[in-house]
Structure formats: C-alpha cells, structure tokens
Amino acid sequence: AAGVIQSPRHLIKEKRETATLKCYPIPRHDTVYWYQQGPGQDPQFLISFYEKMQSDKGSIPDRFSAQQFSDYHSELNMSSLELGDSALYFCASSPRGQMNTEAFFGQGTRLTVV
Amino acid sequence: GNSVTQMEGPVTLSEEAFLTINCTYTATGYPSLSWYVQYPGEGLQLLLKATKADDKGSNKGFEATYRKETTSFHLEKGSVQVSDSAVYFCALSPPLNFGNEKLTFGTGTRLTIIP
C-alpha cells in the first residue's frame, strides 16, 4: 500500500542556507501536517494544510514557510538555517477530520545544520 | 489548552515481563486518544486508538482503555518481546473540529526489552 513519502531522507546544510523538504501524502488524503522532532524530544506541530489552504499553525518560526500544491503534495521551506533547526521533520497525511484515526506519518527527513 | 503527560523513561524490562506506560491528558470536551510507536530510525506508526470514553484500543498484544474519570489512557502489554523495544508516544486529538484536529504528543517513553 502507498505510504506518505518524504524527500529527501537526509539533508545536511550549513548555517544561513535554505532547505526545502517535500511530502507526498497518501492518495485521496487531502490534509497534510508537518511536525518537528528534536533529538530526544516529542514531535512538535508546525503547520497543516487542507485543500491547499493553511488550516492550522503551531510553533513554526517565521523563517519557515510551507504550502500545499494542487496535487496535494506539500513543501516546507526553511531559510536562514540555524544549528537549532537540526531535527527530524515528519509529514503526516489524513482524510479531512480524521487525524486521530486515519493519520499516517512519513519516515521523516533528518536535517542536520552544521 | 490540550496537553499529554506521559510516564518518563527510559523503561527497561526483561522479556515476557508485564508492561505499563502511564499517560494522562488535559483537554476540553471529548478528545480522541492514541499511542504511536517509533522504532529506531523510523517514522511514527499508529499503534492503537480510542475515540470515546470506555473504548479499548488494542493491537499486537498492546491495549489501552480510555478512562474519562481519571483522564488516562495507559498502555499495557502482558508479555513484552525484544522486538517491542522502541519509543512510545501517547497522543491526543481534540474533538472533531475542522481545522484543529492536530495531534498533541506526550514526551515519549523509551522502552528497552532485554532477553
């Protein structure tokens, strides 16, 4: 069965560089969520999209932006990277309103800022 | 706001031991509750879920019962295996309210099972 696909799996960037993370949801899932998980931390909600519109916003820095495209894939753009941005970034998708029962997470993108 | 308080780890048990990982929550209304498991280097996988009071979620020998009176959703397994070694996250999702159904996670409990 198709799962949530994230790319790249690993990314190494230098401070002040930019990074773009991509998420391809499960077919027919119209809602995408982004989470950030620091080392030894619980996942923190960043932002979500439904039908290409931002539906909720969490602790996402102003240096980050995201969007959902017409094919429902989503991209998280991160600029002026800082060492503290090093983390595992998860994307999850679900049908609308079913985050707790039908949500599937990708394997994550591990971002390392050096 | 919504929050999840989870038993701190790490937890180390011998194979075939009984497991309990405590989870309590704070939320308005009737949230949905779930447990996620994260194996080393992997993403989060939904282990089990319960959407209303007194519901019991179960999967792979794990169980958790939604207790509204104690606002708890403790994870249990009668006989753990080495392959159960992972990090376990308790999570809460608010009542169906379009645009606000994101998951709130607990801090995670690292479980190690020794042969």
Image (spheres, helix red, strand yellow):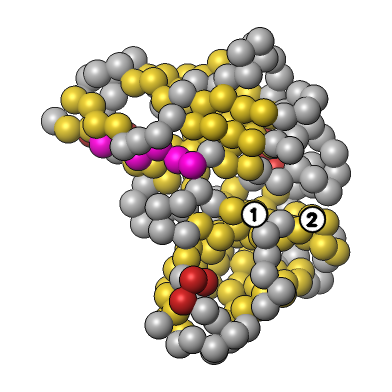
Residue B95 on the magenta span: no
Q: Is residue B34 visible?
A: yes
**Where residue A9 sits in the image (x, y, percent)?**
45, 70
**Where residue B28 sits in the image (x, y, percent)?**
78, 28
Query: Toward which corner of the image does residue A16 lie, by quadrant?
Result: bottom right
Q: Is residue A4 left or right of residue A109?
A: right
Instruction: Judge by depth and name the residue closer to the eye, B92 or A85.
Output: A85
* Contact, mark 1 vs mark 2 (Cβ under 8 Å): yes
Element class at badge 2:
strand
Residue type beneath disc 2 = Asp
Q: Which residues are magenta?
A: B107-112
Residue at image mark 2: A56
Q: Do discs 1 and 2 belong to a common subunit?
A: yes
Residue type beneath disc 1 = Phe
Which of the marked residues, 1 or 2, is nearer the chain's N terminus? 1
Q: How far, Cα to Cα, is label 1 from label 2?
A: 9 Å
Q: Which mark is residue A45?
A: 1
Q: Identify which residue is drawn at 59% across, 34% down.
A: B4
